[in-house]
Image (cartoon, rainbow, N blue to C red):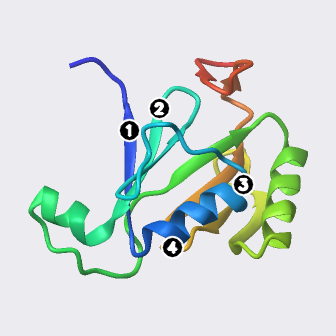
Amino acid sequence: MQPRVTIIGLGVNDLKTATAFYKEKFGWSLTNASNDSISFFQLNGILLSLYPKEKLAEDATVNPTGSGFKAFTLAYNTRTKEEVDQIITDLAAKGVKIVKQPEEVFWGGYSGYIADLDDNLWEIAYNPFLGLDAAGNTIEEK
């Protein structure tokens, strides 16, 4: 099996409002493959999909109930600490829930956390040990 991820699928409580969140707050555009049942956003090499939580659980044959920490986060890495601050400031101005303000972190980077409407956590981070190419893809080392 090749080491890759092609789609990150998030189960959401309300597809319409979750889709609007990513379009309006993050400024992302839907792909042509999106429809009334599922939303796709093209990231820098993978897709993010939003799908109704109950239907996603049914497809995976698991129980859709649960609350609290989901034991995973999504990360958006930046090229500078200042970019982290700017993104968090912009999202806060748009009414996005800020879970943790940006700060220096134990592993040597700088990051903060926000939550989408379904409390999926996004880390907005600057990692001095991880480079990004022009498209925002990670590269081995700086």
Q: Residues within 10 Å of mark 4 (few under 14, many from 20)?
A: some
Mark closer to the chain start, 3 or 1: 1
Question: Mark 4 or 1, which is nearer the eye?
Answer: 1
Q: Amino acid at mark 3?
A: Ser
* Residue position for label 2: 46
**Label annotation for residue 111:** 3
Residue type at tag 1: Ile
Give the CA separation, mark 2 to mark 3: 23 Å
Disc 1 target residue: 7
**Displayed quadrant of residue 85:** bottom right
Q: Tell me the mark number nearer the camera, choosing from 2 and 3.
A: 2
Q: Report the side of 6 relative to 66 (left or right).
A: right
- The amino acid at mark 2 is Ile
- Please say if the residues under marks 2 and 1 sit with CB atoms less than 8 Å apart: yes
Type of amino acid at the residue the image marks with label 4 = Asp
Label 1 environment density (alpha carbons within 10 Å; few <14, some 14–19, many ≥20): some
Using the numbered discs, state the Cα–Cα distance from disc 2 to disc 4 in whole angstroms. Answer: 21 Å
Report the Cα–Cα distance between label 2 and label 1: 6 Å
Q: Secondary structure at mark 3?
A: strand
Q: How many marks?
A: 4
**Image coords of residue 131 (percent x, y):** 70, 24
Q: Earlier in the sequence, mark 4 or mark 3?
A: 3
Mark 4 sits on what residue?
A: 119
